[in-house]
Amino acid sequence: MTHFGLANVGGVVCNGDMFKSSPTPASGAAAPVVAGAEGAAAPSLPPAEVYAATVGPAISELVKVRAQITALQAREATLLQQCDEAASRLARDEGHLDHGEFAHRSVAAEIGFALRESDRSMVHQIARASTLVEHYPAVHAALAAGEISQGHVSVIRDAGGILGIGDAEVDRKRAIYEQQVLEIAKTETAGRLRAIAKGLAEALACRPLQDRHAEALRGRGVVLVEQPDGMVDLVATVSAIYGKGIMDRLDQIGWAVKNANRNAAAADPGGEVDERSLNEIRADAFVEMLLSADPSGIASAHGKGLAAIKARVQVIIPEEKLRDRSAAGSARRDSASGSIGDKASDHIATELVGYGPIDTDTSRTVAGLSPAWERIMVSTLTGQVLSTDTYRPSAAIKRFLAARDLRCRAPGCNVMVNRSDIDHTLDAALGGTTSTDNLATTCRYHHTMKHHPGWKIRQHPGGVMEWETPLGRKYTDRPGSTVRFRRVVHAESADPF
């Protein structure tokens, strides 16, 4: 596997195990009274106790409510699938010559009229529900049990679309994908799951990404959508690596302007203040660069975009693979020649961090323009990063943390490492060491939050982080590498390497 963390493309893929909540210490105990029967103030309580008395029970009930909602969503999917199946059966038994089109349109209208929704929209809802119930039964069951959300379902179903629907072999691969992705979905947010699901599905896809990407490129384009009040939306459909590169460039410009404005305001409190938001600055930079840029690059089919992207290339090497002498020799030859994605290893996808698998030709071009590659040795049994090195000198600790953590280590946060700080778990001022077992990457938002009263952060062996909230709830976040690089073992899967 080859990982791309683009210097102006942002971030790193994948994510860690999280949201394993332990009960609130006061769980089951009666909440302290905070107001009298007529709204009058009760005997004074410390503010922290008032906060805990309100928020603690609310969170517990919210968890139950969310489980009830997902159970109803699973039931709705079952009912929609039953209606869809009934329409197919009616068309088959009556010998409809339109292959059931009218029957399906009719049942969509029946449901849409009853629910006061567009019957055209209902056609798509029925299709998604049928795919879930018929092709992802374990995911459907997890939704009914409240173990995952509708957002997880959408990510799993969308990423699995490349597997297709057809013969027994396709069904077998989909079952493998479902098993792998569901294990991770139960401990991850839907946002973190997306890139992981894409990678898992890609490893099982029958049609190569290279072919699908070449076909998808024919659909690239720019569309202008008029909006009220003198505004428009400009929507561009481009390769993922270009889109990520453009957005990261706008982010860099936006933050540079924001920081410059902040420094100017501090130096001259009475001066003019630039009140633009980060998003406004991005939009202004987009317009300015596009209207004043040199368009000569379009004379080439590939333009100059890739040359402007400075990639951070990480070559992921499974430790188990190097036990085989011939494989080790092949890996050395590939490193020497700069080869990525040869025919023997095309099933090991090249990934654009924060997005997922990308085509081999693009990745080979970007890697060739990179001044250095990093080699990351991982264990596919545990997913742990074992060692790192590079073809030019760099800070070993920073390199290791970037490979291990992949993104902010706060539960649920998907901010990528190049937008995060390297933070001491136990402050250096309190005796914390500057070592990989006391350092982790956190975004600035969570870096500052962890220093607020009541928050406690601990780091366990293997880089496992434990976050304890002011309410005493504990959440575990595992390094993103242990999720993304670990091989999921099951009876029917082939060795992915």
Image (tube, rainbow, N blue to C red):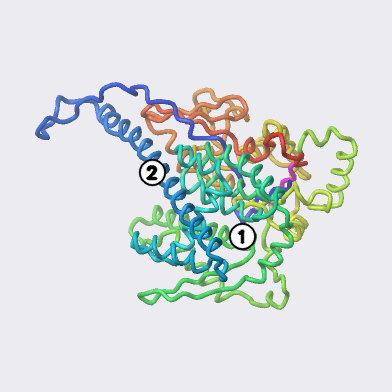
Residue under label 1, please give it.
Answer: 245
> Where does the C terminus fall, quadrant-wise?
top right
Residue 267, position as x, y percentages in the image: 41, 54
Residue 365, position as x, y percentages in the image: 76, 60
Residue at 83% of width from left, 47% of height from top?
Answer: 335
Choose the circle earlier in sequence order: 1 or 2: 2
> Which of the numbered marks, if any, corresponds to residue 69?
2
Residue at 67% of width from left, 68% of height from top?
Answer: 217
> Is 269 covered by the magenta stretch?
no
The three-letter code of the residue at mark 1 reads Gly
Whether residue 274 is visible, yes or no, is: no
How many callouts does the rendering have? Answer: 2
Q: Does 343 appear above or below 331?
A: below
Q: Quadrant of residue 406?
A: top right
Circles 1 and 2: CB atoms closer than 8 Å: no
> Which of the numbered marks, if any, corresponds to residue 320?
none
Range shown magenta: 312-316
Residue at 53% of width from left, 22% of height from top?
Answer: 431
Residue at 75% of width from left, 47% of height from top?
Answer: 348
Element class at badge 1: helix
Taking depth in this image into account, of 242 and 193 the one nearest to the observer is 193
